[in-house]
Image (spheres, rainbow, N blue to C red):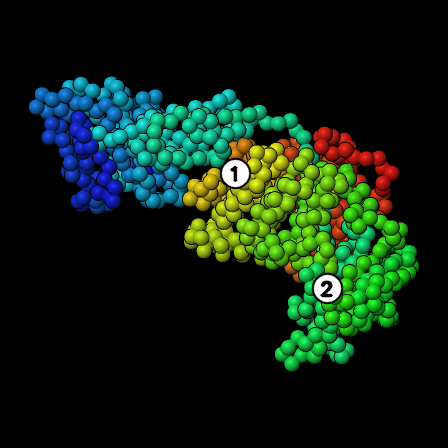
Amino acid sequence: MPAASLLFRATRSLFLFFLFLSQSDAAILDSDFNGSAPGANTPWSATEELNPNLSFSGWDLGAGSFADGTIDNALGFSVDSTDQLSTLDEAVAQNEYIGFTLSPTNGSMLDLNSVQVRFTIERRSYHAPRLYAVLTSVGGFASQDLLFQTAYIDNGDQSARDFNFFLPSTGYDGLATPVEVRIYAFDARYGGHSTSLVDFSLVDGVQSYTLNVSAGSGGTVTSNPNATVIEASSTISISAQPDSGYRFAGWSGDLTGFGNPRSFIMDNDKNIVATFEPLPPLEMVVGNNIGSIVDYTPAWPFWDLFKRARPWLTQNSDGSGGFDSGFGYSIPVDSQGWPTQVPFDPGNGQPDQAVHSLILEVRIPGTYKFIYEGSGTLQFNWNDGNWQSLPTGGTQEFEFSVTNAPGDCWFLIHSTAPPPNHLRNFRVITPGFENADPADPFHPLYVDRLRPFGGIRYMDWGRTNNSNLTSWSNRTLPDSYTQSRGEGVCLEYIALLSNTLMQDAWICIPHPADDNYVRETAKFLRDNLDPSLKIFVEYSNETWNGIFGQTGYVQTQGLANNLSTDSWTAGQYFVGQRSAQIWKIFEEEFGTSAPDRLVKVLATQSSVVAVTNLRLAGLNDPAINPDLVFPDTLAIAPYFAGNMTSNDIPPIAPAYPTIDEILDTHMPMAISAVRPEVQAQKVIADTQGWDLICYEGGQHYVGIGAAVNDATLTAVLNGANRDPRMYDRYRTYLDILKEEGVSAYYNFSNVYPPGRYGSWGILEYQDQPIEEAHKYRAIIDWIQANPTGVTEVPGWEFY
């Protein structure tokens, strides 16, 4: 069979690797492989250093090795290998090694107790051996006599890898006979693949410490290097592996906390224990994502509709031009955002500007009250282009009737008096709420249909995607003229809704937010959210997803912080770094209550484990995460998906998919595919000691690319989402998540109208009859059938 060419090269490197004998910090042997084809000129006996009381036989090859004379300045040889990875036992049986013998001279005795062995390996091809073992004639040349084995070297790793270990502290002294040292190469596949031994040396008098690592019941632990005697100041990495049915529960002894693998410096003797705990019982809390506060939402978050009015638009005051002239950013406003000068001059020779806003999707019929204050020229229009001029001065009320719902309200300010008499404090009161308490701003149906859930994720309420919120002073306030600002809904309403529902609050910190914003947010939630509720803290949202501005931002920041020269890797490392910084600030503000009140969330790309591993690598790197702050949960979004492209519809495809095909053929397969996706992430979560949760989830059927604008395809996908069979599909999907150990699932999303960009809502509109909302009905019934003690589903009367 072909020989697996295992080339060992020993040259002098930047780091001289010595093993000392009977002298303080002195080299016993330092091999020198400078020369032409050492592998073909064995025994190779040149040395840089050799103790004068020793005789060195030179490096030679075992009977199962074959010299490789094509490499200069390297000791080369090959070993046999099949298409199966070779084992150490096979390497020993076939004498696939290189080695040498040291002999005492002048009547001296060999004393090799605690002598350090140092060597450098450099693989030169993909299929070169990945493991190397050292054995001696003192201990024996059987696999069970192993003194040292290197860590695995990845196939693609062709860098120089340094290794060192200490010979035993007993049994290697008073030796009057020669001692043979052999290095075996194994875990090799195929032939003709070269490796170099860059340096080899024996050193005595090296300061060392003892490392004892052990594992509690439920798992195993390994160290790299895999040794108990370690050179002082060495960096050690230890990793814990839970058994099936267990998860990592942290380090104890001379190392505490989490992080797996974990690195540390040998600055003393260390005893470290990896602890494990049984996996918790299968139990899954179901939460919900709620949609952005925008003027066109079909949800009813507030009974005062102006809280969701569109941020101010402008138009030319002389009536020329279009609907929006684009000067909303330059309107003179007061601290609450009410215009203080209308019309105003936008500059650049443009016409003076009027100011307007609108509220779409007014669905409740009846008589509305429009209450406002101040003086000026104000017009109102209900859905028909028929503008009505309204009285101003002081506090005014204007009533309008909605009979042809849903419809739209339009407000146009032609002019306003100077402050403090400027037009301001607009309120549009839903019928039946004329005497409602402003301290309770939420529409009851909005609240009631959220009651069955165990938590609310406020990602969209916070307008997290593409956020421009950098500082605490820029945040939305309760008395801001609208809650639909680009900075998102005020934290006061977030805390109030969670307290009203008595449900956990999941917040997403905007990607450009500064530390002061983070700290003030932590203080506010600490002081205003019911202390019995959990606060989930996540950095931004989907910072791996290129459709959002935050993905480019984290890559830019990662490069600027020199986390990597590769922009993608730098971005993933930065997510870990910034997340840890945010969690630390929250922990500082919550103090001793942090473990009970905070849930630190590391989100990742559900279907790409490589993203998780990069973020994990950043968190486990002390240079990136110096405070070693780790999350409590790993969050994924395991949608059952069907992204339809132009290839799936005519003229490329023979026909459009049918609702039956989607629901009965494609969707069951998509749901089944969720299981291995979740399993892969669960392994990582268990290894780190984290819970696995879902920040989003549900169906994800939508046209992409050119197919997004295909009306026929959109009708099919929307029809599938409205089909009663979706009830069973969701129940099956939720069962799988629970079975695979997901502890919390946050559905996406609450109320969202179907369209060409997806059918995300489990309710299409706020007062949709529940018998028609099959996804919502399935989730509520699943919650009832899978109680957790966290959620309590009320009776069906609120439907």
* Front residue of this view, candidates 271 and 33: 271
Secondary element type, mark 2: loop
* Front residue of this view, candidates 505 and 242: 505
Who's the residue at 76% across and 67% down the image?
422
Which residue is denoted by mark 1 in the rendering?
Answer: 630
Q: Which mark is residue 338?
A: 2
Q: The disc labelled 1 sits on which kind of residue?
A: Phe
414 with respect to 565 (left or right): right
Secondary element type, mark 1: loop
Disc 2 versus disc 1: nearer the observer: 2
Residue 713 shows up from this direction: no
Instruction: Give the mark, 2 or 1, whose residue is nearer the N terminus.
Output: 2
**Residue 350 falls in which quadrant of the image?**
bottom right
Binning the other alpha carbons within 10 Å of mark 2 as few (below 14), some (14 to 19) or many (20 upward) gives many
Quadrant of the rendering where the N terminus is positioned: top left
* Front residue of this view, candidates 417 and 183: 417
Q: CA distance from mark 2 to mark 1?
A: 43 Å
